[in-house]
Structures are given as structure tokens and as C-alpha cells.
Amino acid sequence: RCPAFIRLRCAGTVAADLRREEQPSGSVETGSKDKTPKKTFPEVQNERREQAQRTVLIHCQNKVSERKFLKYLSQHGRIHSHFFYESFGFYAVVEFCQKDSVDSLLKGTQTPANGTEAAIPFRSRFLSLKLRSPPSQGSEQPQVLLNNQLPPSNRKLSELLCAAKSIDDQLNTLLKEFQLTEENTRLRYLTSSLIEDIAAAYFPDCRVKPFGSSVNTFGKLGCDLDMFLDLDETKKLDIQKNKGNFLIEFQVKNVASERMATQKILSVLGECLDHFGPGCVSVQKILHARCPLVRFSHQASGFQCDLTTNNRIAMKSSELLYIYGTLDARVRALVCSVRYWARAHSLTSSIPGAWITNFSLTVMVIFFLQRRSPPILPTLDTLMTLADEEDECVIEGNNCTFIRDLNKIKPSENTESLEVLLKEFFEYFGNFAFSKNSINIRQGREQNKPDSSPLHIQNPFETSLNISKNVNQSQLQRFVELARESAWVLQQEEAAAPCPPSKQPWGLAALLLPSIAQNKKVQKKLPSERIKSLLESVKNNIAQSATHT
Ligand code: CTP
Ligand code: MG
């Protein structure tokens, strides 16, 4: 690991430092050996937010000469970093050293004027560059190095996995290829910051903070961008109201419930994004969900975005996951592989339904790592007992207290390899008494299920809730069957002692093949086909008799 570490230090950029500390490298060693002081979640969030505010997003209509482009922008101040990428067009992300430079650049911009269309004069940090003399069609396009924002193809990944030296190496390779890059992380914070500018037109002191897998260390390239509209700063102004005889009437408009207030705020923001949000398309207001949200695509970044408000607990669970993901390097590698394995077998899906979610899978891995002997991860109760006074946090009556300074948590003594952990994970959940027990990372042990949902994973903070309530029996059954088969495949390989690297899929690559799922299907095919055709004939009969009637 040393050469990479030295290289990052020599580069000497804040960005490199942020990356090193925020995302522990996917190395084989356990977190226990890593002595680098780690940043707290709020520290990372604040630094990234400040960085995003010094950054602009520029849509370039043609490929530009990098040198000329930077020279032009440098008129407004020193540039700290930049990169180009391709999404629905060609874009540049430019971070200045000072925020003043962004203001200076914006002063020199103009709103597009077009005879047939009227522009809405909303000044955003998302700009469009139009060259006065663009390079002609025939002339050579400037060469620009594009930063990749996409995960590798299945084929490329399969090659990489086959060429790995061991199963541990495979898990680390998968993580390295899929984890969010420094640039992708910056783009995520920048997008949140641009959305915050729009929301601030209505709620001047609001904050839009990314949460979920974009920031909890478990994100992968291509994952959605969850954002939380924090109106707490606005609420803090209310403290003033007891001082005099006046109430701030324009800020406090009473509605029947907190939920209704959330729905109204999101409804207004949904309209705002739809009408004024540069690059925001396909805006959907999903206000009747348990947690109301506005869903949209941010075309320039290519992110599918979910904006919620009044969702502070989810923010807290992102912080908890950040702690677990940063404590020990094995956690992220194992979670990444389990998530990838689940996606490869369609156990998870991007469409909401009765499937297990990535969040549930992550909590299952954390639970499993708490159950190892000695434990690899501490329980939430342990993290609570380590908490200081300033860590205390109660949200809507739920105790969300836990230690936030990672450096105060004792590293695990456990030295099990990723290979062992992966195999044991499949064995553990292949034999778990789901019908009787609930998964509980607060206490780090199974508990009796409080209800009859097939899969019960207690929400770590709202303990009466089940985070996998949506999962039905047949999806759970598929998970269990695939887990058993995967444990079996790994066991067989161990017995056969393959000598990697090999052209044939082995280790993790063998677990991702559809064949392990199909082995079972072959036996079932006949009866299910028969039942299908029986159902079809019954349906036809009903349809026919309905027509006759
Ligand atoms: N969350 C929660 N309870 C749930 C579902 C989600 O508390 N039942 C919170 C978690 O903090 C989760 C975040 O909302 O991380 C975002 O949810 P989601 O986008 O579904 O999961 P991610 O962790 O972001 O994973 P993915 O990469 O699949 O988006
Ligand atoms: Mg998400």
C-alpha cells in the first residue's frame, strides 16, 4: 500500500487527502492496522459542502482546448481542480480556490436570449459555454481526457475477477472498480449544492445534504443520489420569537400535521425543480409514500435523485453506516460483493417491490460481522455507551446517540480473511431461522420476531419499524436458496483447490454466474410450466364465458 499512499501525499491536494481518509482503500489488511486519523461524518459533509460551493458545472457545446478553457476561467481566480466527463453532453467540473471567483464568473454570464423562447432569469452555477468560433466540423477536435463516471462492463469485470490471485483479491478488485471515485463524489456534492440553490429561492436558510449510499461509504458508481432538505436552520430563527410580542407570520403557516407540512414543502419544491431547475427532468412528486419525496433526473450529472425532507433519522443511519464502513476495510469489500451478487441474481432491483434492498443487505452484513468471534464490528449499543455528551441525539423521541469520533473506537482483534467471511456469510444466512428471529444491529443478536413479516430487520433507530417489511416469502426463499448454493460452490472450490488465475470463472466470479440459480430452476421447470399453462387455460375459459354472457 505504501507507494499509492506516498503518491497521494505527494500530489498534495485537499481532494486526495479527503479521498484517503473518507474512503479507506480496498486493501486486504484489516482496519485495525490503519492508524490514519479518520474524519467524522459531519466533518466530511461540511468540507465537501464548502468545496461544492466553490465549484461550477459547465456544459460545453463542443470539446474545448483544456489549456484555453482553464486560462479563460483563471481570469476569475485560481483553479483548485477540474475534470471533464461525458453524460448527455460534454461537461466540466471546475473547483476554484475561493468562492469569490464563482461570484466573479457569474457576474460575467448572460441569460440566453432566444426569439421564440423566454428565459426564466434564475442564476445558477450550472453554466453553458458557447464558443464564439467553434472548431469547424472537419477540423480536428481537441483531445480532452474524460473522467469515467460509469462502472465497468460485466465482461471487463469478469476478466478482472478471473485474473485475480485469490478470492480476497477478487473482493477487493470488485470494490476498487465499483466504489465511488473522488470525482463522482464531488459531482454528487455539487449536484446537492445546485439543488440547494434552487430550494434556497424559497427557503433561504435551508440546506440540501446528500445521504444514503452517496455518502455512507457503500455507494457504487451509478447509484442514486438521495438528498435531504434540512430546514432546521430556518427553525433556529424561531428561537427569537419568544423575545418580543411579534410572531413571524410569513414563516409560520400552520397546517394540520407535520406530515402535511412536509408534503406541502416538497410539492412546492417539485414545481420549482420542474419549472426552474436547470437540467432537472422527469420530476415526480411522490407525496403519499411513508416518507414523501420528489424524484427527478439530473440530466447533467446523470444522477437519479430522490429529495426528501423531515427525514433526519435517515441522515443519522447514513452516519452510522459511515462509521461501520470506515472502521474496518473488510466491511466495504464484503458489502460490495454481497450487493453485487444479489443484483446479479435479481434479488435486488431498481424498481420498488417485494425485493430485498441494498440497505437491508448492508445491515445484514453488519449484523453478521457483529456475530463473528471475536466481533469485527461493535453493536450499536456499544457505540452508544462510548458516546460523549456532545454525541447525544434524540430525534422525534428516538434515541440516536452513538459515538461519532471513529478514532475512539477500539479496532477489532479479528483477522479472518474476506474469503472466509464471504463463505461464512452465505452459510450463516443460508441457515438463519428467519421464521422465528429478527435481525437487530442495536444489540448484535437475534431476537424473537415481533410480527409475521417473512424478513424482519429492526430499524436501528425507529426500533418498532422493520426495514425489510416489503420483502415477501418467495423473495426471501430465493435469497436463502442462493446463499446456500453459493456457500456450497465455495466449499467445492476449496476442496478442489483451484489455482488462480484461471480463464474459467472461479471464486467470486463463479458465484455471479446465472448457472447457480438455474441449477435449481431445471428441476422446477416442468411443474411451474404446467401450472402456468393450466392458469392460462383457466383464464381463457373465464374470458370466453364472460364474452358469451
Ligand atoms: N433508509 C431507512 N429505512 C429504509 C430505507 C432507507 O432508514 N427502510 C435510509 C437509509 O439510511 C438508506 C437511505 O435511506 O441508506 C437511502 O435509501 P436507499 O436509496 O433505498 O438505499 P441506499 O443505502 O442509498 O442504497 P442504494 O445504493 O440502493 O441507493
Ligand atoms: Mg440510495
Image (cartoon, rainbow, N blue to C red):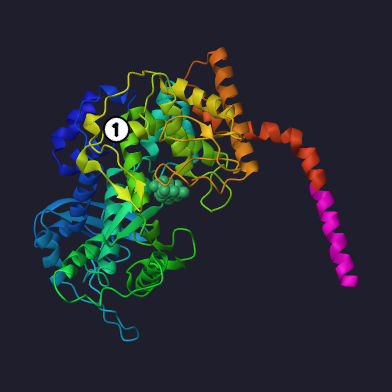
Residue 543 part of the magenta segment = yes
Mark 1 sits on what residue? Answer: 385
Where is the N terminus found, in terms of image quarters?
A: top left
Q: Report the residue that reaches farthest toward the bottom.
A: 115
Can residue 504 be seen in the rendering of this structure? no
401 in relation to 67, above or below: above
Q: Report x, y in % for residue 453.
A: 59, 44
Residue drawn at 86 percent across, 69 percent down? 546
Between 292 and 100, the residue placed more toward the observer is 292
Residue stretch in magenta: 532-549
Report the side of 55 relative to 29 (left or right): left
Residue 108 forms part of the magenta stretch: no
The vertical placement of 473 against 204, above or below, is above
Which quadrant does the C terminus fall into? bottom right
Residue 328, by quadrant, is top left
Q: Toward the viewer: 439 or 270? A: 439
